[in-house]
Amino acid sequence: MTNEKGFWLYDLKVEVSLENRNPICRHIEGEYFSVEGENLIFSSDQKVSMYALAAILPLLPAKQRVTNDHDWMFTDAEVACPDPHCGGRFRISRKAKRWFSHYETTGLPEDRGTPYWSKELKG
């Protein structure tokens, strides 16, 4: 890392957690997807309900950010399925931190550099 302006984001793991609750929707204990930067990463056999995903998505960018240990975004880690009769929960865990440089992620033309994902394609 250089003196360049940038920020840290956590990689996330979003995992189905039933803990003896009965799901109504298709939630399978232990299924998960990962979040790296702006990307949702699913293995080929994993599935997530689009309605559950709609409930989870708004929280993911905030969970990626560094927060105070007393902030609820740091301490609260489960999101309920939006179906009020479903016992499905999604546990969001922070994993490794990843550095993003400002010039690789901004859309501002005067500050724009080579996108971070373009470097991944090259090597």
Image (cartoon, helix red, strand yellow):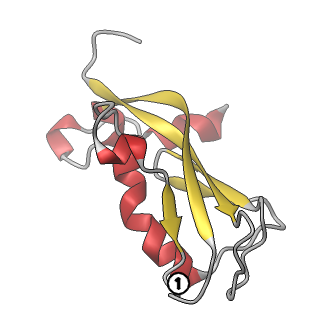
Residue drawn at the location 18% of the way across and 46% of the way down: 108
Measuring from the top left, give residue 94's x and y in whole percent.
53, 39
Element carrying mark 1: helix
Answer with the quarter of the image where residue 31 lies. Answer: bottom right
89 displayed left or right of 31: left
Of 72 and 58, nearer the camera is 72
Can you say whether 52 is above or below 57 in the image? below
Q: Give the mark count.
A: 1
Across and down, in percent, residue 99 comes to 43, 26
Report the front residue among 62 and 76.
76
Q: Residue at x 42, y 50 (%)?
A: 76
Name the one closer to the observer, 52 or 122.
52
Quadrant of the frame with the C terminus: top right
Q: Height in image: 60 above or below 52?
A: above
At 60% from the left edge and 37% from the top edge, which residue is drawn?
120
Query: Looking at the figure, which quarter contains the N terminus?
Result: top left
Quarter occupied by residue 18: bottom right
In the rendered view, does 58 fall on the left or right side of 25?
Answer: left
| Left/right of residue 5 with respect to residue 9 in the rendered view | left
Badge 1 local density, few (<14 within 10 Å), some, or many (20+)?
few
Residue on which disc 1 sits: 51
Q: In the displayed orientation, state which residue is furthest to the right.
A: 45
Q: Amino acid at mark 1?
A: Tyr
Q: Position of residue 97 (x, y in %)?
A: 49, 28
Give the percent coordinates (x, y) of residue 62: 34, 49
Q: Residue furthest left?
A: 110
